[in-house]
Amino acid sequence: MVSLRTVSKHYPDGTIALRGVTFDVEPGDFISIVGRSGAGKSTLVRVLLAEERVTRGQVSIGGWDITDIASRDVANLRRQIGVVFQDYKLLPRKTVLENVAFALEVCGIPSRRINEVVPQMLKLVGLEGKRHQFPEQLSGGEQQRVSIARALVHQPRLLIADEPTGNLDTINTQEIIELLRKINQLGTTVLLVTHNRDVVNALKRRVITLDGGAVVSDQSVGRYVL
């Protein structure tokens, strides 16, 4: 599913964000990527989304070597990866349904297909009854559910959740993590990038720890130990 081989990222100012990172992600994995601020987590996400090019090493996703991906192919790559961020990035003047549908509309997906897929995604995230509400009418947890539904409309095999609970209280955090568990159980590989120790320890799943841009721990049933 995902393969990184001795991946390093150096910036012109001398900053080394990633140092020889090597790991594999198998289909169906649920992996937490953890580390202190500045450990390299955000750079790793940008590399997987082809927003950053590596200085050395190789990156493959779904058997596709994206190390030197052409600019014209980046959009296609990103349609194969669902991404959820800490800030929900919803369009304030569009309803829940319209926000999710928009991700398909911009790709030229026919209306008939959109009308099939969007209600399915809203049901999956438990928001079928709020399809006509606007983001400002929703709680933070509900807004994050909309962003998750939007990330899933292309039916990606990989979902990257980058600090998805960073703006949420404990109850909403638990609900979002349970939703990610459910999505994983349905067959989607999940990479959870987080600094939330309680979430990581409760998951009892594989944990990759970054420190100083390097992988310092990779545990099949891990804990947040930093």
Image: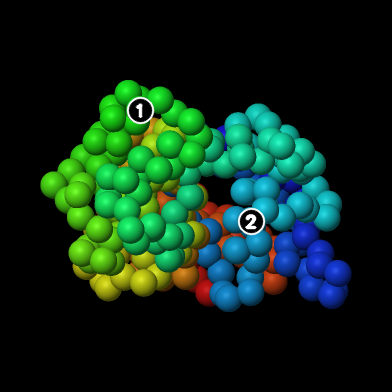
Locate residue 101 relative to residue 109 in the image: left or right. Answer: left
* Residue 183, position as x, y percentages in the image: 34, 41
Q: Are marks 2 and 1 in contact (CB under 8 Å)?
A: no
Task: Name the residue rendered at 27%, 52% in the picture.
Answer: 95
Q: Secondary structure at mark 2?
A: helix
Of residues 206 and 189, the one drawn nearer to the viewer in this rendering: 189
Between disc 2 and disc 1, whose residue precedes? Answer: 2
Say which residue label 1 marks. Answer: 111
Task: Name the residue rendered at 52%, 41% in the picture.
Answer: 81
Q: Compared with residue 129, is residue 213 higher up or lower down, i.e. above or below? A: below
Say which residue label 2 marks. Answer: 46
Q: Compared with residue 3, is residue 8 higher up or lower down, i.e. above or below? A: below
Disc 1: CA contacts within 10 A as few (<14), some (14-19) or many (>=20): few
Q: Compared with residue 186, is residue 159 higher up or lower down, i.e. above or below? A: below
Task: Name the residue rendered at 60%, 63% in the picture.
Answer: 41
Q: Dividing the picture into quarters, in which one does residue 20 lie? A: bottom right
Q: Disc 2 or disc 1, which is closer to the eye?
A: 1
Task: Name the residue rendered at 69%, 35% in the picture.
Answer: 73
| Residue type pointed to by label 2 | Arg
* Colouring method of the image: rainbow
Q: Secondary structure at mark 1?
A: helix
Locate residue 184 relative to residue 68 in the image: left or right. Answer: left
| Residue type pointed to by label 1 | Ser
* Residue 98, position as x, y percentages in the image: 32, 46
* Residue 71, position as x, y percentages in the image: 74, 42
Of residues 80 and 39, the one drawn nearer to the viewer in this rendering: 80
Locate residue 68 relative to residue 116 in the image: left or right. Answer: right
* Residue 44, position as x, y percentages in the image: 64, 57
